[in-house]
Amino acid sequence: MGVDLPSVGCCADTATVAGPDQRIAPIIPHVGILGSQKIIRRPGLSGVEQNLLSPQCQLCIRSVTVHGKGDRDGTPPRAGNPLKRWLKAAARALALILVLPLLLLYRLQSGLFGPDRALESASQLLSLLPGITGQYLRRAFLQQVLAHCHSSVLVEFGTLFSQCGAVLEENVYVGPRCLLGLVHLERDVLLAGHVLIPSGGHTHAFEDPSRPIREQGGERRLVRVGAGSWIGAGAIVLADVGRGCVVGAGAVVTRPLPDFAVAAGVPARVLRFRTAPSPSADSNQSADPALSAVPPPDPPSCPAPLPDQE
């Protein structure tokens, strides 16, 4: 379990993590993956003394964020239930065995029609399988045919893939009935239902009015969705989305979004930033007049502790 301490406040320089040999005080219970509790303590104080801290101090302590499944700085995650890990590994192995006939059919169709057409056919079949069974079978198949698909990826019912070059990183969630083309979903990306991410915004050319559009070809390009972003239901993403972005339901993203932007509308416009944008995001924003953003408010500071009362 990792802990991020507040950068300001009366308790930031003294808060520590309770070790296994320390008595747990009822300040900040946090249920981990095994049901254990982790709390934030000030050294040298008992549990009763912790409760006697000023409300402001306890507010600072409670503002500490406790992360599960290991720190993002590379700290290994805490060991889970061995039986649960074994059962999941067995389920993954069984799912791979069950999709072997479909993988053989995919290889045969790839030689005849190309890998992308073969992927469309197989994903249509697998998309009809409901529940956890469908999730395991889809993941087992996609791990073998996509450019990359992490073992923690979860793909819901009705989702279709059309490009074998797609990349799905760790802890990616793809909601029901999504349509995905040449896309790179970085770690911790969340896609709500009915999200459409084709292979860029120029898959069909239409400049020549004398020719049918189907004969004019097009261009496919990789669309990247940055780590930790959340794409709302029914959104259409035609351009890159930065890290930590939030795209509103039904939005149409036609231009790249900077990191930590909150965007909505048709076409999508930046409404605000979740945090102060980076210098690179500022340059991108100023270069693109279509992205109008409201500067974020100043972050709240920790209030000073109240004077002791007799």
Image: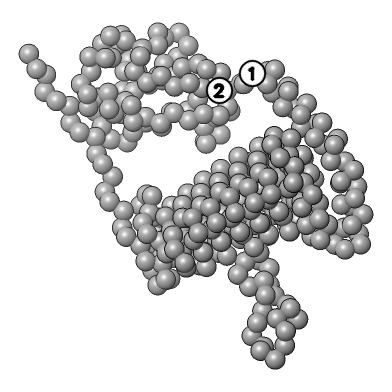
Left or right, 105 with respect to 295, comes to: right
Q: What element carries label 1?
A: loop
Q: Is mark 2 on a helix, strand or loop?
A: loop
- Which residue does the image show at 28% across and 35% down from the upper left? 8
Amino acid at dot 2: Ile
- Label 2 belongs to which residue? 33
- Label 1 belongs to which residue? 81
Badge 1 density bin: few <14, some 14–19, many ≥20, Cα 10 Å:
few
- Which residue does the image show at 52% across and 17% down from the upper left? 35
- Which residue does the image show at 66% across and 64% down from the upper left? 199
Give percent across and percent down for residue 132: 69, 34
Query: Mark 1 and mark 2 in contact (Cβ < 8 Å)?
Result: yes
Above or below 243: residue 171: above
Residue 243 is marked as none
Give percent across and percent down for residue 174: 62, 46
Q: In this view of the protein, can residue 116 be seen by the observer?
A: yes
Above or below 187: residue 64: above
Amino acid at dot 1: Asn
